[in-house]
Amino acid sequence: MIEIDALTKVYGAAQVRAVDEVSLRIPAGSVFGFLGPNGAGKTTTIKMLAGLLTPTSGRVRLGGFDVARQRPSAMAQFGAVLEGSRNVYWSLSAWQNLMYFGRLKGLRKARVAERAQDLLTDLGLWERRHDKVGGFSRGMQQKVAIAAALIADPPIVLLDEPTLGLDVEATRTVKNWIAEQARELGTTILLTTHQLDVAQELCDRVAVIRQGRLVADLPTRELLARFRERDRYEIRVEGAAPSGFDAVTRDGVTTISARVSDPLEVYDVVERLRAQGAVLESLTQVQPDLEDVFLALVSEPSHA
Amino acid sequence: MTFIRGFAAEVRKGLLDLLAGWREVLMEMITFPLFYLLIVLFMGRGQLRADLLLPVLLGMVALTFIHEQVNRVFWSYLGDIQSGVLEQTCLTPLPPAASILGRQVSAVIAALPTALAVLATGAVAVTVQGGELPVDAQMIVPLAAIALGTCGLALILCGLTLVFKRIEIITQLSVAVYAIAGGTLVPLAAMPDQIAFLSRLVVPVAPGIEAMRDILLGGHSLAALPTGWGLGWLLAQPLLITAAGVVLFNRFEHLARHRGTLGRH
């Protein structure tokens, strides 16, 4: 479990509040999405969580251990892949990197070797284990970084933009793997990403930070439901656009956007379409995706 | 046990880097002996004078360790900060100062091939000039003092670079000060008293080099070193500098965590 209490970071003489009183509870075995636009305070929060940056005030506990006061125990609970960083030594091979980081975490050599074999096999890197990481593709380097973060089998893993710059296949491998870690092994995963489709697919819960403050912290489904536009429907009909509707025609199919004050009014809309001879193809209530929700949250007027 | 495993991993990584950079080691094994011979030639006005070969050889061997322990470790540490790998090493239960100490041990081992090449060149040159290369097991003590004291300096410089950008010049300067004020080329006894006093006090290699000269050139025992401040200071100075290095490194590391400068990628 990750517990963050009133975490605040104030920088420099200008007293810039990069993170302001952020509190989160991330239960064990869940995938938690931590989202925010550039400069919102995501990286600062993550670095404080990892103990790489000392908070001005507030507290972080990883698996029950205080990061500031019980650093060695807290770090034993934790593995991370940080964005914009190499994370592993490019001059060493994948195998040497895993052995190095495993030993650095305090594991016995035999245990590290066993775990490294499992991880490299799972990630499809076993055949290239003795090649230098510097010669790997971006996707393979990222897989080595993920393997290094998980070498000690930590119960808590932070993945900062884990699919950034990866091709479709590598992204799918990483996504499947994240889901498997959480669902089957019970690992708590804190995920940050700008790829909101990835977050929507993987995260049980999502928090959004903006200008250093949390503007949302809800289960993903609940967050999406809150932004569901119950009064908007999308109706697709064959052929040209009927008159009196807000419609767009493309490739012989017309999409009508209908706004109603009462769900029963949908029947009236359909009746009006039938009266004009329109052939109904589909009728759906508009469902927002995480991107819509995110944009709505970060574009609201600031109250700061 | 965690500390020992982490420390050993750091040493092993340093040695793997050394193996990967064997061409650089080979170049140093050629250039350092060449520099040694050139320095003796310049100091001897074009002659490989027997009275200069041995004192300069001692200084050059010491400089080899300084180069590896300060220059190589500093640049590799800075590289880790800039590539972001250092942050990963901080996500372990291992105290960050232990990482520097592990790098120091591998740097000392990394210095051995070049130091041996310089020694071999010196031995040949001394023999050709009709002399004999003295050997004394007591040498190990001042050599260890030099390695330990240099480790303290490396800790301070690595700590500084965690907080301040572009301090490369300080590293270069400190190596130059070592070469000039440490007595590597000119004995402290030949320097002005105040300079010699300061060197013995704060330059980590100075007491070690002075002791090596006393043992190998003067034939004195460790217990009765005639120049410098004696065996007590030879042992105490590197310990004090390393202790100061650990304290300062931890302070700088603490400051870096406050400012968020552990990674600058």
Image (spheres, coloured by chain):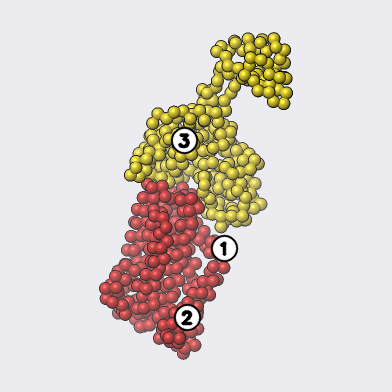
Chain colours: A yellow, B red
Dot 2: chain letter: B
Q: Of discs 3 and 2, which sits in the foreground?
A: 2
Q: Name the residue under label 2.
A: B37
Q: Is mark 1 on a helix, strand or loop?
A: helix
- What amino acid type is highlighted by mark number 2? Leu
Q: Which residue is drawn at 28% across and 77% down?
A: B192
Vertical comparison of A57 with B29: above or below:
above
Dot 1: chain letter: B
- What amino acid type is highlighted by mark number 3? Met
Q: Looking at the rendering, in which quadrant would you find the C terminus of chain A?
A: top left
Dot 3: chain letter: A
Q: Which residue is drawn at 41% across and 63% down?
A: B169
Q: In the image, which disc is placed on residue A2?
A: none
Q: Are both tags, 3 and 2, on one chain?
A: no
Q: How crowded is mark 1: few (under 14 residues within 10 Å), some or many (20 or more)?
A: few
Query: Whole-percent x and y of residue B251?
Result: 35, 53
Q: Disc 3 to disc 2, how far (Cα)?
A: 64 Å
Q: Identify the mark nearer the N-term, 1 or 2.
A: 1
Q: Name the residue under label 3.
A: A1
In this rendered view, identify the residue nearer to me: B258 or B155.
Answer: B258
- What amino acid type is highlighted by mark number 1? Ala
Vertical comparison of B229 with A250: above or below:
below
Q: Mark 1 points at which residue?
A: B20
Q: In this view, does A175 lie to the left or right of B232?
A: right
Q: Is mark 2 on a helix, strand or loop?
A: helix
